[in-house]
Image: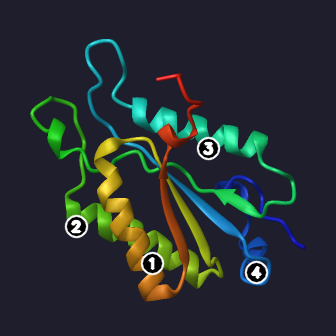
């Protein structure tokens, strides 16, 4: 089986050809640009998404055919719009953007997609996007958040 590079951004055009035949999985990290109090940077959620994705790359079996896309740094953060510096997509912008990414992946041969979330505001939208991708493109699309991977008792 032909395996993808672990980081999507490192792949070349010719390397996408085996995606359909080999059941490749695309992982889309979802972050946000918003406040986390006076002590943390606005990119905290994106850093978490990228960090969890890096751990997935490091820990996953070599035989698992997946690639991690660049993290989406702007999410659905309307609850923080009163804080200067917050960046947000509207509901429609976020849903259309992530559905569009899934649609392009499908066109490239991907039939499986995991949205890996690190921002609470994104959660309801990514569930809707996963449903849209399943219905419109017959993709196995799932949504999960980094907090599902925390060992019991850690939080």
Residue 126 percent across, percent down from the top left: 38, 61
Viewer-proximal residue, 151 or 6? 151
Point out the tag, 2 or 4, that comes first from the N-terminus: 4
The residue carrying mark 1 is 133
Real-space CA distance between mark 1 and mark 4, rounded to the nearest whole angstrom: 21 Å
Question: Dots 1 and 4: beta carbons under 8 Å?
Answer: no
- Label 2 sits on a secondary structure element that is helix
Disc 1 to disc 3, how far (Cα)?
A: 21 Å
Q: Residues within 10 Å of mark 2 (few under 14, many from 20)?
A: few
In space, the residues marked 1 and 2 are separated at their CA atoms by: 15 Å
Q: Residue at x 86, y 53 (%)?
A: 62
- Label 2 or label 3, whichever comes before in sequence order: 3
* Mark 3 vs 4, N-terminal side: 4
Mark nearer the N terminus (1 vs 3): 3
Q: Secondary structure at mark 4?
A: loop
In the displayed structure, 112 sits above or below 150; it is below
Mark 1 neighbour density, 10 Å: few (under 14) some (14–19) many (20 or more):
many
From what the image shows, is residue 111 above or below residue 63? below
Mark number displayed over residue 92? 2
């Amino acid at each position: 089986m032909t395996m993808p590079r672990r980081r999507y951004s490192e792949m070349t055009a010719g390397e996408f050809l085996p995606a359909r035949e080999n059941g490749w999985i695309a992982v889309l990290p979802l972050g946000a640009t918003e406040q986390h109090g006076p002590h943390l940077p606005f990119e905290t959620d994106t850093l978490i998404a990228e960090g969890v994705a890096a751990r997935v790359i490091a820990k996953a079996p070599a035989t698992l055919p997946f690639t991690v896309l660049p993290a989406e740094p702007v999410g659905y953060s309307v609850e923080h719009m009163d804080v200067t510096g917050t960046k947000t997509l509207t509901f429609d912008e976020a849903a259309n953007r992530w559905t569009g990414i899934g649609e392009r992946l499908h066109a490239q041969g991907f039939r499986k997609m995991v949205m890996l979330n690190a921002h609470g505001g994104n959660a309801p939208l990514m569930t809707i996007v996963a449903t849209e991708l399943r219905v419109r493109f017959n993709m196995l699309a799932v949504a999960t958040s980094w907090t599902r991977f925390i060992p019991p008792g850690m939080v």
